[in-house]
Image (spheres, grey):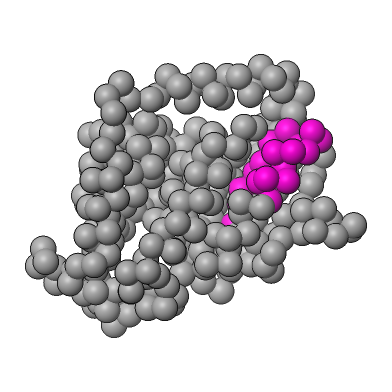
């Protein structure tokens, strides 16, 4: 943190600044279509903690640098170092989960301003937010089944809460790409505008939210979360074990290798 910008990020690959009552957090890795690197995940929770305590901040807006991508997934170049070994997998998952749950649990409204590719981790960031505003040229996909990796319980719940179990299975099992029109039709995003209209739409939402009653908005957000809770207890440990099994599998190694070699993976369920 510094005097010029109290929301200075811990990495240059995440930009943060105040615009009126809105804190903007922008993923800034355009050379990799804003793929999320370790330092980018780590930068998010401290920024949200400051915003939580700052009465001047009424909402947070997440976006991606440039016009091609919101977030194109995880930075695949770090997988060998960060996700191949058991302890590295555990650390990476903890980092990503801390950032995503930090967004999800943030007491004030959050907006994902999406333009271009919104893939994998990008979808996870966007569905952790309260509202998703997208441009007509946006593209959505969850390619987990093409890499053999596990998909965390919290992210799957967010997806199901938004689009329902049937559509969640369609998106997840097939790894197919959805255009903005389909994303809007199934409820994956709230609004779609031409690319040149996104900035104005975000500003409009920021104005409406920042002029609303903060305690009412805070209470409404929390109560909606309670409404979505499942009645039955969830076996968290089993879910974690299933995800770890994915990361320890031969199929995960094959998916990662095939991605690097630019070929189709051959999965064997082992």
Q: Quadrant of residue 243?
A: bottom left
Q: Residue furthest bottom?
A: 261
| Residue 201 percent across, percent down from the top left | 65, 37
Q: Hey, which residue is sitting farthest right in the picture?
A: 3
* Relative side of 96 to 178, left or right: right
Q: Is residue 225 visible?
A: yes
Question: 54 or 111, which is in the foreground?
Answer: 54
Residue at 49%, 21% (x, y): give it: 224
* Magenta span contains residue 258: no
Over which residues does the magenta segment extend? 47-65
The residue that appears at 23% across and 41% down in the rendered structure is: 169
Number of numbered tags placed on the structure image: 0
In the rendered image, the quadrant that contains the C terminus is: bottom left
Q: Residue at x 39, y 37 (%)?
A: 158
Classify 91 as above or below 118: below
On the image, the x and y values in percent for residue 163 come to: 34, 33
Q: Position of residue 28 (x, y in %)?
A: 63, 64
**Image quadrant in which you'd find residue 44:** bottom right
Query: Which quarter of the rendered picture does the N terminus lie within?
Result: bottom right
Looking at this view, is 106 or 265 the one in front? 106
* 253 relative position to 53: left or right: left
Residue 159 visible, this orientation: no
Q: Nearer the viewer, residue 129 or 38?
A: 38
Left or right, residue 103 beside residue 201: left
Is residue 75 rendered to the left or right of residue 55?
A: left
Whether residue 50 is in magenta: the answer is yes
Residue visible at 46% across and 41% down?
127
Q: Quadrant of residue 61?
A: top right
């Amino acid at each position: 943190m510094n005097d010029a910008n109290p929301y200075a990020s811990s990495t240059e690959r995440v930009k943060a600044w105040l615009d009126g009552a809105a804190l903007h957090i922008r993923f800034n890795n355009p050379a990799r279509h804003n793929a999320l690197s370790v330092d980018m995940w780590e930068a998010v929770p401290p920024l949200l903690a400051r915003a939580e305590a700052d009465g001047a901040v009424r909402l947070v807006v997440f976006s991606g640098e440039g016009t091609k991508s919101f977030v194109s997934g995880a930075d695949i170049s770090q997988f060998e170092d960060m996700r191949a070994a058991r302890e590295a997998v555990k650390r990476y998952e903890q980092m990503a989960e801390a950032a995503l749950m930090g967004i999800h649990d943030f007491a004030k409204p959050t907006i994902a301003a999406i333009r271009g590719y919104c893939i994998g981790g990008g979808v996870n960031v966007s569905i952790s937010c309260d509202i998703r505003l997208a441009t007509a040229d946006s593209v959505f996909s969850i390619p987990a089944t093409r890499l053999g990796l596990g998909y965390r319980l919290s992210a799957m719940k967010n997806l199901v809460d938004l689009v329902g179990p049937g559509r969640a299975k369609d998106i997840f099992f097939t790894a197919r790409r959805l255009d903005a029109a389909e994303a809007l039709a199934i409820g994956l995003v709230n609004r779609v505008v031409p690319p040149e209209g996104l900035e104005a739409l975000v500003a409009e939402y920021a104005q409406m939210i920042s002029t609303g009653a903060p305690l009412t908005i805070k209470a409404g957000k929390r109560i909606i979360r309670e409404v979505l809770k499942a009645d039955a207890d969830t076996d968290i440990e089993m879910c974690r074990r299933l995800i770890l099994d994915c990361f320890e599998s031969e199929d995960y190694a094959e998916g990662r290798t095939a991605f690097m070699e630019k070929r189709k993976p051959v999965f064997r369920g082992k």
